[in-house]
Image (tube, grey):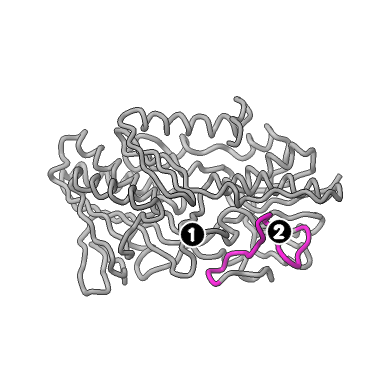
Amino acid sequence: MKKVLVLGGGFAGVEAAIYLRKQELEVTLVSDRDFFYIYPTSIWIPTGEATMEDVSVPLDELAFAHGFQLIVDPVTALDAKAKKVTLQSGRVLDEYEYIVVAMGQEKIKLEGMEAHSLSICGKPEEATALHEKLDALVQKGHGKIAMGFGGNPKDTSAVRGGPAFEVLFNVDTYLKGKGIRDNFELTFFAPMEKPGQKMGDKALVMMDKMFKMTHINKKIGVKITAFEEDGILFEDGTKLESDLTMFISAGVGHSIIAESGLPLSDAGFVVTNEYNEIEGFEGIYAIGDTASLMGPEWRAKQGHVAEVMARNVAYNIFQHMQRIDSKHSYMEHLNILCVMDTGNGAAFVYRDNKGGKMIPMPIVGHWMKKGWGWYCRNSKLGKIPRLPGM
């Protein structure tokens, strides 16, 4: 039986391991942590509506449910030509015919960012830290909160804007529920002129209305230069004062991948074709945030696209083993799709080549996203059937 090594325990890696096992292949998944983290539902951790345990699934349970081998040990080196992987423990993995690289991405680092801001899209522990800092401000009864995201001029797909909007609107709802919203100054910040433009012009108009309705301030269109303990500095010489700063930095290629010998984009992501194959490296595939995403300017790295890549690669590897010239591409599935939660409702966001739309879903939208979180956990564990295409 052919052996496949999957590097990464996120959406792309877990989905690849599950679907490779459906092809009855021998699969080993390597992860730097022992749980699969459901980032889209971590937005409720800062307000105390969820805990880290609520949005985590133990990888050993997933491995048992689907029959893949699990190694929890960070990757320290990848030699792509030799198909050799070195782990932090010193263990070397070099007996695999196929390697699926799904190690995610790293973040662009700005001055003071790591010391003076927290991210909802960073290490899982940061979401809990956000909850603790927000709770301290609530106990105090007043404060200034700033939340935003950054961009990457070298790769516009590597931007996580949606979660920043979600946490901000959830905090607004949370403070209103406490009866203390008027005692807090909430500000959204981003360096681009039209943050959220990927969603389309109609969505931008609706977002602007939402900011006005919730009395959330905006500081946009000016480059961020540094983070300080009490605020954010901008290129125009201004400072946004903040007692609690959440910032989602744009992504860049993983440092391990940079030394792997694989072909990279200007932003450090692995260059693949639409089948996630890598020219000159037969048997090695890159998926999810690790891969340089092809497509139009509005494209975005999202979990559902990563999972499409993973399922395709499982199919493509199996076909390759059978010497059958049949491959699946992710290009026809390229779109922006999300339910943007606000704590008391949500908005359905969709964007493709025909344009974008945002549909308000008061009350029911919040519970739809809650339901998706339950579905994600239980379908991954094999406790309920997967819906077609999901």
In percent of width and height, residue 46 lies at 34, 43
In percent of width and height, residue 198 lies at 41, 55
Marks 1 and 2, the one that precedes in the sequence: 1
Which residue does the image show at 77% across and 54% down from the upper left? 98
Which residue is labeled 1 in the image? Answer: 157
In percent of width and height, residue 56 lies at 51, 39
Queried whether the magenta region covers residue 278, the answer comes back as: yes
The Cα atoms of the two marked residues, 1 and 2, are separated by 19 Å
Q: Are marks 1 and 2 in contact (CB under 8 Å)?
A: no
Which residue does the image show at 64% across and 36% down from the upper left? 62
69 with respect to 217 (left or right): right
Which residue does the image show at 79% across and 59% down from the upper left? 94
Q: Say above or below: 249 vs 20.
A: below
**Category of crowding for the residue at label 2, using alpha-carbon neighbours closer than 10 angstroms: few (below 14), some (14–19), many (at least 20):** many
Which residue is labeled 2 in the image? Answer: 277
Q: Which of the 4 image quadrants contains residue 86?
A: bottom right
Q: Main secondary structure of the magenta part?
A: loop
Farthest residue, direction front: 354
Query: What range of the chain is rendered magenta?
Result: 266-283
Q: Amino acid at mark 1?
A: Ser
Q: Which of the 4 image quadrants contains residue 63?
A: top right
Which residue does the image show at 58% across and 49% down from the upper left? 306
Farthest residue, direction left: 182
101 with respect to 317 (left or right): left
**Category of crowding for the residue at label 1, using alpha-carbon neighbours closer than 10 angstroms: few (below 14), some (14–19), many (at least 20):** many
